[in-house]
Image (tube, helix red, strand yellow):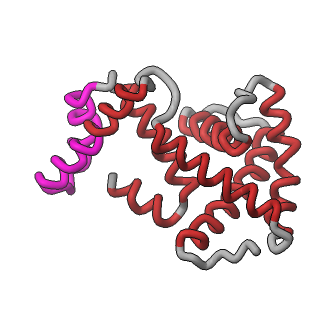
Amino acid sequence: MYISRQLKQQNIAEYLLYMWQVEDLIRANGCDIGQIRRNVVDTYLSLTDPQRQELTQWYEDLINMMHDEGVMQKGHLQINKNIIVWLTDLHLRLLRSPKFPYYSAAYYKALPFIVELRAKGADRDVPELETCFDAMYGVWMLKLQKKEVSEDTQKAVKAISDLLAMLAGYYIKEKKGELDLD
């Protein structure tokens, strides 16, 4: 919860990937708050009792939301889907604006990889940016499992990562009122 707050302010792309990991962590613990308390919350030894209670409540709220939204087995919470919607809106406005040629260049560099991912079976009904985040998350999971990531995949992830990093930076500027798209 504390990490999520910090990431949401500093890097929306990392925040979204973190929240997807939290969703998977909840699923891995059977969507059971008792297991999450034992396997997650109690591992943070430096937390005070009120902080533990707050963190437990955060996980419990997420579990309830996952239940209510029918994403206990797979899928993403609406709060996380909303971020994709906001980022997609910003992404499209950046592409339409002549003031951001470097962003457009990063997008067109990543586009062949996005198209390839979608052709290989990625859900074509989701926004392109969600495909990008899916790729990043998938590679992150492979690395955590100490599995090999091919050179071609690393190249694709580099282009996608560069695009998402730029988008995350523009997102922060927009939130601060410092982004002039006109």
Q: Residue at x 71, y 29 (%)?
A: 125
Nearer to us in this view, 132 or 65? 65
Q: Main secondary structure of the magenta part?
A: helix
Tell me: 162 left or right of 98.
left
Residue 27 in the image, given as x and y percentages of width and height: 39, 26
Q: Residue at x 50, y 53 (%)?
A: 15
- Quadrant where the C terminus lies? bottom right
Residue 173 in the image, given as x and y percentages of width and height: 60, 73
Nearer to us in this view, 73 or 68? 68
Q: Is residue 34 above or below residue 135?
A: above
Tell me: 77 left or right of 26.
right
Nearer to us in this view, 22 or 176? 176
Q: Is residue 51 above or below residue 26?
A: below
Q: Which residue range is magenta in the image? A: 32-59
170 magenta-colored = no
Q: Residue at x 86, y 71 (%)?
A: 98
Find residue 168 and report its image quarter. Answer: bottom right
Residue 143 in the image, given as x and y percentages of width and height: 60, 39
Outermost residue on the left side: it is 49
Residue 137 in the image, given as x and y percentages of width and height: 60, 39
